[in-house]
Image (cartoon, rainbow, N blue to C red):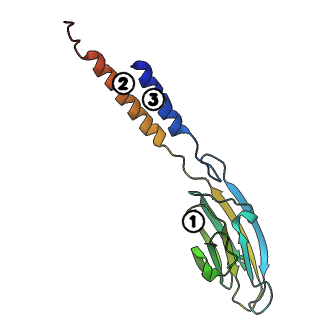
Amino acid sequence: MCRLAIALASGLALVLVAPTVVAHSPGSPPITASGSFVLGKATGNNASFHAYISTLGIPPGPGDTLKFSWSANGGIGPAISFNIHFHPANSTNISLNYATTYYNARADRVDDSWVVAGTGPYMVFWDNPNNVSETVAYSFVLLPPSPDLTVFVVFPVILAVIVLLLWAARRRPKRPVS
């Protein structure tokens, strides 16, 4: 009986401790990326910048927190549009009307964060609706999800129940042999 309890407890511990597959696993260090680019005038070429977040060096995964900061012309503007979005899998339509938007802002400076909802090729999009060119400076920090502490709560409880059951089984009076 004791060997069975130890085997069950060991097996359960291994299942609970087994890591899950994520792009950025709990406990790993933050991933950072920064840079700058120029958005042309609204009436000219290069008025927008549309890119996969992963091409900027940030591989977001479910549960990660993406902290982002950017400014247009050092934060003095004028305001530009920014969003984080996702296009459906295998889609060749890159229109923003065909995307799911997770974050949207129109500002000359943004300092915010977003918790990554799931897997997917997430994208960022900046658009200049103004008739002046704007220099955009950006910084991204990808923080891993918080570690799952369930194993530290569930395993001791299960172990305590097993010990209690073994203790109770040994304390039962033995039946007399007839």
> Which quarter of the rendered picture does the N terminus lie within?
top left
Kind of residue indicated by mark 2: Val
Distance (Cα) linking label 3 and label 2? 10 Å
**Front-most of residues 105 and 96:** 96
For disc 2, the marked residue is: 163
Q: Secondary structure at mark 2?
A: helix
Residue 18 image point, x, y percent: 56, 39
Badge 3 density bin: few <14, some 14–19, many ≥20, Cα 10 Å:
some
Residue 177 image point, x, y percent: 21, 6
For disc 3, the marked residue is: 9
Image quadrant of residue 141? bottom right
- CB contact under 8 Å: marks 1 and 2: no
- CB contact under 8 Å: marks 1 and 3: no
N-terminal label among 1 and 3: 3
Kind of residue indicated by mark 1: Trp
For disc 1, the marked residue is: 114
Is residue 146 visible in the rendered structure shown here? yes
Distance (Cα) linking label 1 and label 3? 38 Å
